[in-house]
Amino acid sequence: MERPIETDGGHAAASSTHTVRLELIDEPGELLAALQPIANNGGNLLSIYHERGNKTPRGHIPVEVDFEATDDQFETIVEALREEGINVMQAGTERYAEEITLLLVGHLIDTDLSDTLSRIEECASASVVDVSLSAPKGSGAGVSSARLRLAARANETVTALEAVRSIASEKGIDVIEPLAGGDR
């Protein structure tokens, strides 16, 4: 349902429904903190799907929020969410249009896999969609591998891969990419 919103000059801007998919830490107040940028920037909340029983590969809670806003407000809201440190996994339908599957090989446990994934997430061009880890028994007892499935913004696959390569190089991890048919 579209409704007009008054803008400068008396022209009406159409409001439409937008969806953002967020990844939140399971701590009190995180959901409220994620909703604040939407309210502060003119979004009209329609629904929240909080998947507390379903964790992301990083152990966080996926939350889907539907709201009404103009296109300009939507862009401002997404920027505000990111500025607040909220991981936006998907914003609308066009944000993360390309998927890349790659393999990290090396001492992933010793070099803190959680830190590696967090740093990849900080890259505004990509979001970690899925992680599959294969490690030898025992803590830090050798080389391990992780298959990563990344969602990259449309036309920003190269930027996302460069970010992964840089992080991996710094940690002495090899990157094998992209894998074809690596969806399973």
Image (cartoon, grey):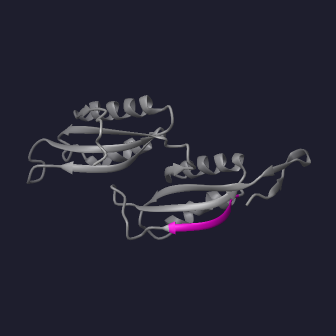
Q: Nearer the viewer, residue 85 or 14?
A: 14
Which residue corresponds to the image point at 49% horizontal and 56% vertical from the top-left?
A: 22
Start-end of magenta stretch: 43-49
Residue 9, quarter of the rendered image = top right
Q: Nearer the viewer, residue 183 or 121?
A: 183
Instruction: Look at the image and tell me whether residue 43 can be seen.
Output: yes
Residue 158 shown left or right of residue 81 in the figure: left
What is the x, y in percent for residue 38?
64, 58
Instruction: Look at the image and tell me whether residue 116 can be seen.
Output: no
Judge whether 80 appears above or below 64 on screen: above
Q: Main secondary structure of the magenta part?
A: strand
Residue 46 on the magenta segment: yes
Q: Residue furthest right?
A: 10
Residue 118 shown left or right of residue 49 in the figure: left
Can you say which quadrant of the picture contains the N terminus? Answer: bottom right
Q: Residue furthest front?
A: 181
Which residue corresponds to the image point at 56% horizontal and 61% vertical from the top-left?
A: 65
Q: How many marks?
A: 0
Residue 180 on the magenta segment: no
What is the x, y in percent for residue 123?
44, 39
Q: Nearer the viewer, residue 34 or 5?
A: 5
Residue 172 shown left or right of residue 148 in the figure: left
What is the x, y in percent for residue 59?
34, 60
Q: Nearer the viewer, residue 100 or 72?
A: 100
Which residue corresponds to the image point at 29% horizontal and 40% vertical from the top-left?
A: 181
What is the x, y in percent for residue 26?
41, 66
Which residue corresponds to the image point at 71% horizontal and 46% vertical from the top-left?
A: 72
Residue 145 shown left or right of residue 142 in the figure: right
